[in-house]
Image (tube, rainbow, N blue to C red):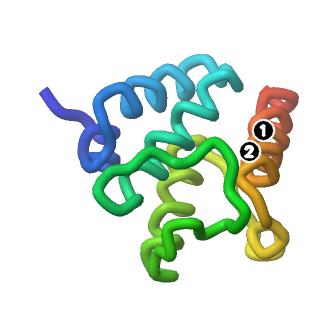
């Protein structure tokens, strides 16, 4: 039986969807990295996993529309909002992960 998450994240591996489901139930920040990795993998050429460190926010040379879809999926999965100004400042994968962790931590503080 499929549900909303299966439909929304249909290009992701089952492990990624399970991590999204678990994150939404627990808000466990340890799930942010595997969710991020799984969504990036969905959009990367030939399903290659994201490298552990990038020198650019777009190491695979993805089209801007694809990048936007990836950002929207990350926002949906983590139930956060990423502002354009925040995204424009990102230069590395570490900065992206730090931003996501800040957003998730802020959400946990409000819960």
For marks 1 and 2, give the CA distance. Answer: 6 Å
- Residue 34's place in the image compared with 45, above or below, is above
Instruction: Bin the neighbour count of mark 2 within 10 Å (Cα to Cα): few under 14, some 14-19, many 20 and up.
Output: some
Q: Residue at x 52, y 41 (%)?
A: 37
Does residue 55 appear left or right of residue 32 in this picture?
right
Tag nearer the camera, 1 or 2: 2
The quadrant in which residue 104 appears is top right
Marker count (numbered) = 2
Q: Provide residue 60's location: percent of width, then percent of height.
A: 50, 67
Q: Provide residue 101's location: percent of width, then percent of height.
A: 78, 38
Most distant residue in the bottom direction: 64
Instruction: Bin the neighbour count of mark 1 within 10 Å (Cα to Cα): few under 14, some 14-19, many 20 and up.
Output: some
Q: Provide residue 16's location: percent of width, then percent of height.
A: 40, 32
The quadrant in which residue 3 appears is top left
Q: Which mark, residue 44?
A: none
Q: Residue at x 62, y 34 (%)?
A: 33
Foreground residue among 97 and 69: 97
- Residue 59's place in the image compared with 42, above or below, is below
Q: Are marks 1 and 2 in contact (CB under 8 Å)?
A: yes
> At numbered mark 2, what does the secondary structure look like: helix, strand or loop?
helix
Q: Quadrant of the C terminus?
A: top right
Residue receiving disc 1: 101
Foreground residue among 86 and 91: 91
Q: Residue at x 67, y 66 (%)?
A: 57
Does residue 72 appear left or right of residue 4 in this picture?
right
> At numbered mark 1, what does the secondary structure look like: helix, strand or loop?
helix
Q: Residue at x 52, y 36 (%)?
A: 35
- Residue 95's place in the image compared with 29, above or below, is below
Q: Provide residue 54's location: percent of width, then percent of height.
A: 68, 56
Q: Which mark, residue 97?
A: 2
Q: Quadrant of the N terminus?
A: top left
């Amino acid at each position: 039986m499929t549900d909303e998450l299966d439909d929304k994240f249909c290009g992701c591996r089952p492990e990624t969807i399970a991590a999204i489901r678990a994150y939404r139930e627990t808000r466990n920040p340890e799930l942010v990295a595997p969710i991020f990795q799984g969504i990036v993998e969905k959009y990367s050429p030939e399903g290659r996993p994201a490298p552990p460190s990038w020198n650019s926010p777009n190491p695979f040379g993805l089209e801007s529309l694809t990048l936007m879809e990836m950002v929207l999926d990350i926002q949906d999965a983590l139930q956060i909002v990423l502002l354009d100004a925040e995204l424009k400042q990102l230069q590395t994968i570490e900065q992206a992960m730090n931003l996501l962790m800040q957003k998730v931590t802020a959400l946990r503080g409000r819960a």
